Amino acid sequence: MSKQYNKYEKARLVGARAFQIAVNAPPMVSVGPHKEPIDLATEEYWQKKLPLEVVRKRKE
């Protein structure tokens, strides 16, 4: 099953990953000159290399 994230989940994932990259976590994509952490995190998201995921609670 492929994950489909809504816009809020995507924003949370990319923001959290951008923060990690900003505090020197190694990026999972190639780093170009003067790339901002948010750009790197967005690129990781689109290449499906983001090391984070959303855990949803099931309604019963």
Image: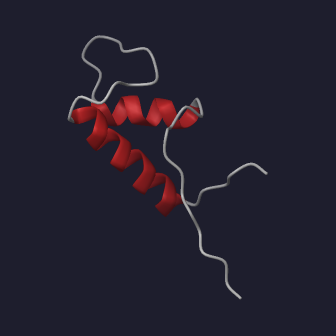
Of 55 and 40, the residue lying toward us: 55
Q: Could you tell me which residue is drawn at 46 percent across and 20 percent down? A: 29
Task: Decide if residue 58 is on the left or right side of residue 26.
Answer: right
| Tally of numbered discs | 0
Residue 50, compared with residue 3, is above or below; it is above
Q: Could you tell me which residue is drawn at 51 percent across and 37 percent down? A: 50
Task: Decide if residue 7 is on the left or right side of residue 26.
Answer: right
> Can you tell which quarter of the image residue 47 is in?
top right
Residue 29, compared with residue 7, is above or below; it is above
Q: Could you tell me which residue is drawn at 56 percent across and 63 percent down? A: 55
Q: What percent of the width, then of the height, locates residue 27?
A: 38, 25
> Can you tell which quarter of the image residue 24 is in?
top left
Q: What percent of the width, then of the height, locates residue 13?
A: 44, 50
Position of the C terminus by quadrant: bottom right
Q: Residue furthest bottom?
A: 60
Q: Residue furthest left?
A: 23
Of 42 and 25, the residue lying toward us: 25
Residue 54, compared with residue 27, is above or below; it is below
Q: What percent of the width, then of the height, locates residue 46?
A: 56, 34
Q: What percent of the width, then of the height, locates residue 7?
A: 52, 59
